[in-house]
Amino acid sequence: EAGVAQSPRYKIIEKRQSVAFWCNPISGHATLYWYQQILGQGPKLLIQFQNNGVVDDSQLPKDRFSAERLKGVDSTLKIQPAKLEDSAVYLCASSSSSWGTNEQFFGPGTRLTVL
Amino acid sequence: GESVGLHLPTLSVQEGDNSIINCAYSNSASDYFIWYKQESGKGPQFIIDIRSNMDKRQGQRVTVLLNKTVKHLSLQIAATQPGDSAVYFCAEQGSGGSYIPTFGRGTSLIVHP
């Protein structure tokens, strides 16, 4: 079974630039999550999708971050404009249940460096 | 605010020893807990979970203990191997009906051969 795919793996941009990350979840998984993991910390949930609908985006900085999952499969996370404090690993995860008690499968992440 | 935290940032053990990683949580309403392992350059990997109606759950070489009285969670790894070297996170979900997972900071486990 293929795992969660993410691209790019690494991205370096200057502050105020825009960046987008892509995630392809495990086939058949209805629930998709985006996390931000700052160095030395645990992942922090940014947004949770159930199919193509948003379940929770309470921790997403909506003034600069946006995410979509238009067809209920792939998802993109965008930052516009980026700030220095956005430097982190952005993890995508998927699970087969929206109730969160099923195992989440994580992708390898995209490491973003904002200069 | 509510938080999930770990007692020790780094744990060093010898190969073959048993390892114990601890986690404290502050939200008494949490009803589901998960341990994840994260190797360098990879995403977290599910290890084992436990619901609040249990106090112990065993997997292959791993055991999770939950003490709701003192709001403490531990992960025990038997016969620790070099491949167990990683950062271990505890996470809690389900408090107040929310299924947003909240991760602690992490403990780095170093296994010396």
Image: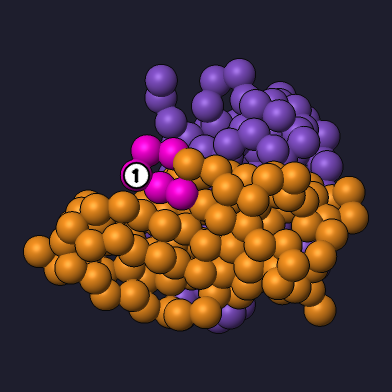
Chain colours: A purple, B orange
Q: Is residue A100 above or below residue A9?
A: above
- Dominant secondary structure of the residues highlighted in magenta in the image: loop
| Residue A62 pos. (x, y %) | 80, 63
- Residue B94: percent from the left, percent from the top? 79, 50
Determine whether the residue tagged by mark 1 lies in a helix, strand or loop. loop
Residue range in magenta is B59-63
Q: Please name the amino acid that badge 1 sits on.
A: Arg
- A37 to the left or right of A58: left
| Residue drawn where x is 40% and y is 65% of the image | B20
> Image quarter for residue B24?
bottom right
Q: Would you say residue B44 is visible in this rendering?
A: no
The residue wearing badge 1 is B61
The answer to whether residue B27 is above or below residue A58 is below
Residue under the image location 30 percent in, 61 percent down: B18
Residue at 44% in and 39% down: B59
Can you tell which quarter of the image residue B9 is in? Answer: bottom left
Q: Chain of mark 1?
A: B
Q: Is residue B60 magenta?
A: yes
Q: Could you say where residue B49 lies in the image, as x and y percent from the top left? A: 58, 44
